[in-house]
Image (cartoon, rainbow, N blue to C red):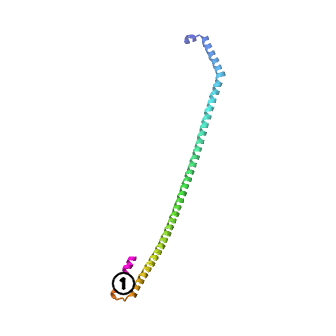
Amino acid sequence: MFQELVGIAPWTVIFTLCNLALTMFIFKRFLWKPVQEIVAKRKALAEAQLTEAAQAKEEALAIKSEYEENMAKAREEADQIVAKAQKTATSRSEEMLHEAQEQVAEMKQKAEQDIALERKKAVNEVKDEIGSIAMEIASKVVEREIDAQDHEALINEFIKNVGEAS
């Protein structure tokens, strides 16, 4: 009956089943455990790599945040240095401007003193010239008697000489 249904002899089915059981026993005994160990090792390796990757990511994020903090500090220090340099430059330019103004004031005072001195020299020269002209007129007056026309001529000559001297 079984033979007719399947079309295979019963001893073939029993032999096939025994063969299958023996293959399963050998597979389980010699291959299942090593395959399971390899799979477990690979799984552990993959988990270790994932853990290492997560740690590396955390370290990278920590390094990145430290880098950003350092950059912020560096920018702040650079801003302070620039502000200090600007302050120094401003104070130095104010000092230079003050020094220049003092020098200009000194030069102006010296020029005014020189002008006053030259004016005194010129006035003294004019006085000397006037004095010598007056002496000439007096000597001419003493030499001769002056009438109104001579007196007017001497005055005109004196004025002409003073105009030429200046």
The reply to whether the magenta stretch includes residue 115 is: no
**Residue placed furthest toward the right:** 29
Residue 39, compared with residue 90, is above or below; it is above
Rendering coords of residue 50 (x, y %):
60, 35
Is label 1 in a helix, a strand or a loop? Answer: helix
Q: Outermost residue toward the left?
A: 149
Q: Position of residue 40 (x, y in %)?
A: 63, 29
Residues 27 and 66: in front is 66
Relative height, residue 139 to residue 17 (above, below)? below
Kind of residue sitting beneath label 1: Leu
Question: Quarter of the image containing the N terminus?
Answer: top right
Answer with left or right where residue 62 lies relative to residue 114: right
Seen at 52% across and 59% down, the residue is: 89
The secondary structure that dominates the magenta segment is helix
Q: Give the range drawn in magenta.
A: 152-166
Which residue is pictured at 60% across the width and 11% down the height? 12
Residue at 33% over, 86% down: 149
Was residue 163 drawn as part of the magenta stretch in this picture? yes
Decide: few, some or many residues near mark 1? Use Cα within 10 Å; few <14, some 14-19, many ≥20.
Answer: some
Which residue position is annotated with label 1?
154
Quadrant, the C terminus? bottom left
Count of labels in the image:
1
Name the residue located 62 percent from the left edge and 34 percent from the top edge. 48
Q: Position of residue 103 (x, y in %)?
A: 50, 67
Asked which quadrant contains residue 23, the reply is top right
